[in-house]
Each structure stands twice: as C-alpha cells, then as structure tokens.
C-alpha cells in the first residue's frame, strides 16, 4: 500500500475553509461557484433607485413571508431559488412622501429561467389620508349620520381605490367598492367578519386606503386610527 503524506499547503487549505465556516464548491477546478439569483428587480422613488427598502416575497394570496431582503444603494434586490408559481413582491419603508407599502403579483413560469421584474415605484405622488385624523374621537356612525373618509389621490393613472376599516384586533370590518374617488361615507354597518350586516360597536378602529395603479402596483397609505363612542 502506498501512503500519501499531506503537504503543508494541503493541510492549510481545508483548515482555512473550516475557519470561515464554509466549504469550497469548485467546478472544473476553476474556483468557487457563485450563486445566481433567479428573481431580481429594483425599487425606485420617482425614478431614482431607493436604497434600504425592505422587500418581502410571499405566495400570492398568502400573507406569510417566504423570504425577505433589502435594496442596495441602487435600489436593486435579488432572491435565490424561487420556485415556479404565483408570487407577490412587497416593498415598504417609512419615508415621508412614500406609500406605506407597495406590492405586485407576478408569475414565475420556470425557476430555471431568471426573471427581472418591472421597477416598483414606492413614491406616493401626493397620495395621503386626510380624515378622520389619526386618533380622532368620533360619534358612532349610523344610517342617518354617516362618517366620511377622505384622502388625496396620487398624481398617477389609476385603476381604482378602496378604503378598508379594521377593528382593534386587526380584523376587517368594512371595505368600500373599488372606484376612482377621494372620499366616501360609511354608515357604520360592517360587511365583513362578525359585524357583517350590523352596526359596529363603540371602540377603537383603524382605516387605510389602497390604491391600484395602472402599472399593476397596489399602493397602501399609512394607517389612521380612530375611536367611535
């Protein structure tokens, strides 16, 4: 039997990989393989790359986050090993003048074929909630004395706008019809959850506006809380 004694270099190489906590992945003795993302895109703010924006990847129709990352200085982001299927990408950052978050659904037809998403513009272009103001205290609305939700529309082409109201536990209570308008009255009757068809009780609530843009993005304005008494 022939014994092969390792050289000093032969001992140092595996030791160096062990020290950095990784293992060499060499192909054709050229060098380590570099992972290649199969889903990439860019978040912009009024056309310029937006850095440090949180980007979440979710299955379409499912609020659970599958993966997340942040944009680089050019607003770029990337995900690796995304399976084929229906997905949603969501970008959010607390920055004055931006939407609270924006999202877009898309289909990844083949996980072996990299997909570059269209740019995601997080700028709100003037859209903002107006009333009720945050922490406003209001009388309970009814059929004869409804309350009004008002907001500013973005200076962009729209497909529609919706208002949604939630109870203190985060459960949806009422959602308006989708249309292009900047105010709507609510008579206090719920159309979702346990208050469907009933006047909602006194208590704490929250509302927000969701804006569907022509490029397929959905932008969400900041939450506003209010109290009915």
Image (cartoon, rainbow, N blue to C red):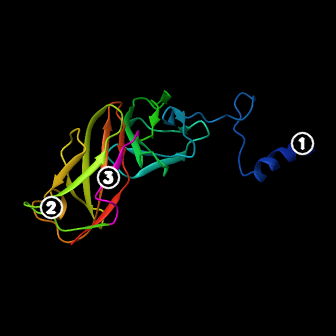
Q: Is residue 47 left or right of residue 151?
A: right
The numbered disc on residue 60 is: none
127 magenta-colored = yes
**Which of pointers 1 and 3 lies earlier in the amino acid sequence?**
1
Q: Helix, strand, or loop for circle 1?
A: helix
Q: Is residue 95 left or right of residue 168?
A: right
From which residue to which does the magenta span run? 125-135
Q: Residues within 10 Å of mark 3 (few under 14, many from 20)?
A: some
Front position in the image: 229 or 87 = 229
Q: Are marks 2 and 1 in contact (CB under 8 Å)?
A: no
The numbered disc on residue 130 is: 3
Residue drawn at x 11%, y 61% as measured from the top left: 145
Q: Is residue 194 left or right of residue 82?
A: left
Alpha-carbon distance for marks 2 and 1? 77 Å
Residue drawn at x 45%, y 40% as measured from the top left: 123
Q: Quadrant of the N terminus?
A: top right
Q: Is residue 177 visible?
A: yes
Alpha-carbon distance for marks 1 and 3? 69 Å
38 magenta-colored = no
Front position in the image: 222 or 171 = 222
> Of circles 2 and 1, which is in front?
2
Q: Is residue 189 left or right of residue 162?
A: left
Which residue carries the number 2 mark?
A: 188
Q: Main secondary structure of the magenta part?
A: loop
Alpha-carbon distance for marks 2 and 3? 19 Å
Q: Helix, strand, or loop for circle 2?
A: loop
Question: Measured from the top left, where is residue 77 in percent x and y?
Answer: 55, 38
Residue reaching furthest left? 144
Which residue carries the number 1 mark?
A: 9
């Amino acid at each position: 039997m022939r014994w092969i004694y390792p050289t000093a270099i032969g001992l140092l190489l595996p030791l160096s990989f062990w020290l950095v906590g990784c293992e060499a992945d060499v192909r054709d003795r050229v060098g380590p393989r570099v992972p290649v993302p199969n889903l990439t895109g860019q978040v912009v703010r009024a056309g310029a790359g937006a850095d440090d924006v949180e980007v979440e990847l979710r299955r379409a129709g499912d609020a659970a986050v599958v993966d997340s990352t942040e944009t680089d200085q050019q607003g770029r982001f990337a995900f690796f090993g995304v399976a084929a299927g229906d997905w949603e990408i969501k970008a959010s950052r607390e920055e004055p003048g931006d939407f609270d978050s924006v999202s877009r659904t898309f289909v990844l037809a083949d996980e072996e074929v990299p997909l570059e998403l269209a740019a995601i513009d997080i700028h709100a272009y003037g859209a903002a909630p107006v009333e009720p103001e945050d922490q406003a205290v209001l009388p309970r609305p009814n059929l004869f004395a409804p309350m009004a939700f008002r907001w500013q529309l973005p200076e962009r082409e729209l497909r529609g706008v919706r208002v949604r109201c939630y109870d203190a536990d985060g459960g949806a209570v009422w959602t308006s019809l989708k249309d292009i308008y900047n105010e709507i009255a609510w008579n206090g009757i719920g159309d979702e959850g346990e208050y469907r068809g009933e006047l909602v009780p006194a208590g704490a609530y929250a509302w927000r506006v969701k804006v569907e843009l022509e490029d397929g993005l959905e932008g969400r304005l900041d939450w506003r809380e209010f109290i009915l008494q």
